[in-house]
Image (cartoon, helix red, strand yellow):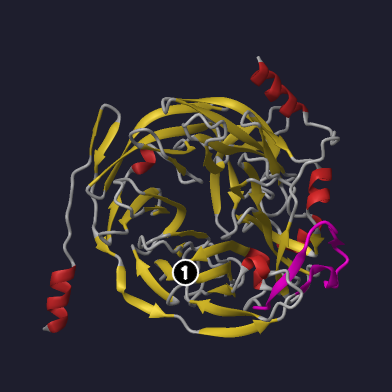
Amino acid sequence: MLRFLIIFFIFPILCWSLTFKNGEQQNDTTTPTTISTSQAIKSESETKLFKPFDCKKLKTEYLRVNNRNDCLIIQELSNKYEVKTHDIDPNTWNRSLLLRYFDNKDGEKIVAHTWNNVVKWGEKSNKQPFSHLAVLEIPNLNNIFKSNLNKISSNHYTVPLTARRVDTIDTDNDGDKEIIYLSNREDGRNRNSSWKDVNYIFDLNDNSLSKFGSSHFSHDLMYFDFNNDGYHEIIDYFYNPGGQIEICDLKTNKCTKSKKVNQYVDIGFNHILPSKDKAIMFGGCPNLGDTTFCWSKINYKNNKISFEKLYNYEFKTKPTDEAKFLIWTGDVNKKPGYWIEGTGKKEFKQADRAWMSAAIDFNKDGFVDSIGIEKEVLCKRNDISKPFSRSGGDCKENAYLYIFKNNNDEKFEKHQIIPTTINDTFRIEKADVDKDGTVDLYGFRQSYYNPWSVCDRQQLKSIYLNKKNEYFEHASNRFIKENFGLYGCERVSNFFEKDGQYYRLFITTPDKESEIAYLGIENYTGKQLASEKEFVDTDQLDALDDLLK
């Protein structure tokens, strides 16, 4: 009887009809749910003490010491894979997803997160997945490079979740940041496995893990304070199949699902831009592959979200052809694209989704601009009776970083195109890397890059320096070498500033077969050499010519 009463009172369902008027989504069937903050789980941790040592003492052949910078190894990370996806992938920290510095009210912290494979790639399994989280307590960052620094205390957690959509925000408006996890099923298991993961908030103050929202295959994590009440609303864009959105109000603890949003936005890597009167979502256009970028106004009221078409930019015509592709799950799916004439259907250019996005007011005009990556995928095969295999080496990728200037929140003008790679810019971060007062861009390598050859793919290859708030310039190899060291097989890098000093966090291993990873911190000068002259790609020169015209 008690169980019946509980279910009766906590299971209200409200419905709205779906209508469209003047190209605007009005509302559709929604299901309110509640964030389970009352069911927070206290996470058990292993406390470790680590004596920092100079990065120069790392025993690795991949060592480029920058004598101008102090650098310390401040933590050992040694969690192993339960199931090795490859014979030479022995450490879970090869796949680091999060590396951040926090200055919370309860003290300075450095946080690192990674995910773990629990099954062989593509295997069906109902086994509970898990991830690893390391939280370092920093007593005083300004004194971290003192020679007499005592051991650093850290807590290491094994958390029962799999998440590759992760970020840090202040979820409860208390001035401290928490970790947001959206459940994502790309931990190696076959999609027919039993998925139990939901979304989580990890509170760094009390080390508790709280569930919120519903169980999804989450793909895009976005957040914004739509109603200016001091609390973020979380947007979870997930596969169902097709695109759906669940938006969660972190003040009221209510979550609402909206269907058929894929008429306005595509599951890719969308981003929210603040605007004068409404927020704007930027990303790939629905059902158009990587041929078009779209901007849509977001309307939010009473925990309901709708969209209104604003603007689009077309790279190429919509594809009319399709080819079969073998994907990582073992399934064969048809993908849109273009057959290359004269190849007898041995060559195919796939129309992939638009990849990665970011928001930045690079020119300081008060309007937030858009950054997006467009990707071209050319595939070749010898046997036309077999599907193309992306992961099997049939395809090569070319990627381009597009800078779009925001004109009065009404139109987005192509401003600059820079060649890049998906591997080096899987996530786009922002920081004043060269300390000139402008916000630069850099590629945060994570997730899909190949960790088994990462020693040959150094971090910091994709730094784009903001030149006088006018355009971006790819940082030269000389700039990188002059300002940053290389300390082993670096997996990820993250920049931050504290009291006028600039730092770089990184995770590294001595070699690609190492079962031990290290977390390091480097302070750096970040000053570009005046005499620096290096080759600039012709695409960059063309973009600069257009800018000058």
Q: Secondary structure at mark 1?
A: loop
Residue 439 percent across, percent down from the top left: 61, 41
Residue in the picture at 59% in, 54% down: 327
Residue receiving disc 1: 193
**Residue 227 located left or right of residue 542:** left
Q: Nearer the viewer, residue 489 or 122?
A: 489
Rendered position, 13 above or below 319: below
Could you tell me which quadrant the N terminus lies in? bottom left
Q: Quadrant of residue 497?
A: bottom right
Residue in the picture at 85% in, 33% down: 533
Q: Quadrant of residue 492?
A: bottom right
Q: Nearer the viewer, residue 249 or 478?
A: 478
Whether residue 140 is visible, yes or no, is: yes
Rendered position, 32 above or below 347: below
Residue 17 percent across, percent down from the top left: 18, 44
**Residue 123 located left or right of residue 59:** left
Specify whether residue 338 is painted magenta: no
Residue 105 percent across, percent down from the top left: 46, 68
**Residue 221 located left or right of residue 250:** right
- Identified by mark 1, the residue type is Ser
Q: Quadrant of residue 532?
A: top right
Residue 247 percent across, percent down from the top left: 33, 53
Rendered position, 137 above or below 190: below
Residue in the picture at 64% in, 42% down: 440
Specify whether residue 72 is painted magenta: yes
Magenta stretch?
53-79
Q: Residue furthest top?
A: 549
Whether residue 194 is visible, yes or no, is: no
Q: Residues within 10 Å of mark 1 (few under 14, many from 20)?
A: some
